[in-house]
Every structure is written in C-alpha cells, then in structure tokens.
Amino acid sequence: MTALYPFVIEGARTMVFVDGENLAIRYGNALKQSGGAAKAGVAHLPGVAVWSQQLSPNSNTLSGTRVIRKYYYTSVQGDTSTVQNAEDWLKNQGFEAPRVFKKNKMKGSKQVDISLATDMLLYASRMHYQIAVLVAGDEDYVPLVRAVKAEGARVHIWFLQDGLSRQLRHEADYFVDLTEYLL
C-alpha cells in the first residue's frame, strides 16, 4: 500500500479535514461501476459518509504523526434525529468532530465546503497543526490550500480515483489516491 505520510517530521501535529459529502458520493458511484462489492473494513453510510479504519490505524497516531483531531463534513436529509444518528455514526468511525448539516430539498447543503474551509484556515492561522490532510479533490479548494500553506503548514490531499483536479494536485505538498483503501 502507498505510504500515507512520507517525509514528515516524527510527531508532527496533524489535523484531518474530510469533505465527506463529496467522498461518499464518489464512493457510491464507484461501487455502482464496480458491481457494488464493498471492501472489507470499509464503513459506508450511503450518500452521507464512508471511511476505512486503514486510514486511521489508531486514535492518536498515523504513520508517525500526532493526529490532533479528525473532522468530517457532510449533510443529510431529514430531521434532527437523522442528523444526530449520522454524527453518532461518524463518532463510531473515530471522528471526534463530525460536522453534519441538514440538506435543504431545494438547494441541497451549502455549509459543508465553507465550514471545512473556515475551520482548516482558522486552525492553520492559530498554528494548531503542522500538517493538514484534506480529503477532497475539487479545484474549489485551491485558494484554501494556498492560504494554509502561506500560514506555514503542509497540505496533503487524499482523494478517490480520478477525483483530484490538476490544479489542486499542483498546489498540494503530497497526494494519495484512496482507491486501494476504500475499493
């Protein structure tokens, strides 16, 4: 398997920021294309979230880094109970800070991307981490990655299959395709 964290300072403070809505949609589409067989050890809440414990070997470290906190941003359609159930599910996957927003039937959810960007940049400016792991691939994140790097942090991009834009790949300090971990 590909090393998730090559060439990093031992014990570097790390935070993980997952655009889970995008990841879950890409994962669901990939499952349909491959015949629908989920890989062992992959937890999947259709349309909402997906994660593998291979990406988080234990609660405190990930290949020599010290993970301070893992954030997962997604949205669900339903009532408060549905939101709480999704948050509980994410906590069971090891995410200390699940951010689950209600989808609006008319507009969908607009809070996922902006909440992720706000948190990631705020914590970079406060020097809470040395490495940000951004699980996303959209070109929309290029300004965020540039701003976080300007604060002195390194940015690793994790993405699923062909979901990494060329511009984001160029801006990242390092990138990993999660296909072998999730599919």
Image (cartoon, rainbow, N blue to C red):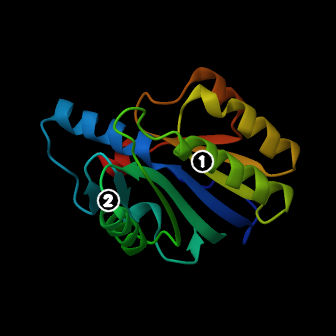
**Secondary structure type for disc 2:** loop
Neighbour tally class for label 1: few under 14, some 14-19, many 20 plus, Cα within 10 Å: many
Q: Which residue is mark 2?
A: 79
- Indicate the quadrant containing the C terminus: top left, top right, bottom left or bottom right: top left
Question: Percent position (x, y) of residue 102?
Answer: 41, 51
Question: Percent position (x, y) of residue 4?
Answer: 55, 54
Q: Which mark is residue 175?
A: none
Determine the residue positioned at 35% across, 36% down.
26
Q: Which residue is most to the top? A: 166
The amino acid type of the residue labelled 1 equals: Leu
Query: In the picture shown, does residue 142 fall above or below 53?
Result: above
Determine the residue positioned at 85% across, 55% down.
125
Residue 31 at least partly seen: yes
Determine the residue positioned at 76% across, 59% down.
123
Query: In the picture shown, does residue 147 fall above or below 164?
Result: below
The amino acid type of the residue labelled 2 equals: Asp
The front one of 61 and 101 is 101
The front one of 26 and 177 is 26
Marks 2 and 1 in Cβ contact (< 8 Å): no
Neighbour tally class for label 2: few under 14, some 14-19, many 20 plus, Cα within 10 Å: few
Question: Percent position (x, y) of residue 85?
Answer: 32, 68
In the figure, is residue 10 to the left or right of 85?
Answer: right
* Nearest-to-viewer mark from 2 and 1: 2
**Secondary structure type for disc 1:** strand
Residue 97 lies in what quarter of the image?
Answer: bottom right
Q: CA distance from mark 2 to mark 1?
A: 28 Å
Residue 29 lies in what quarter of the image?
Answer: top left
The front one of 175 and 31 is 31
In the figure, is residue 161 to the left or right of 12?
Answer: left
Q: Which residue is mark 1?
A: 134
Query: In the picture shown, does residue 18 fall above or below 123?
Result: above
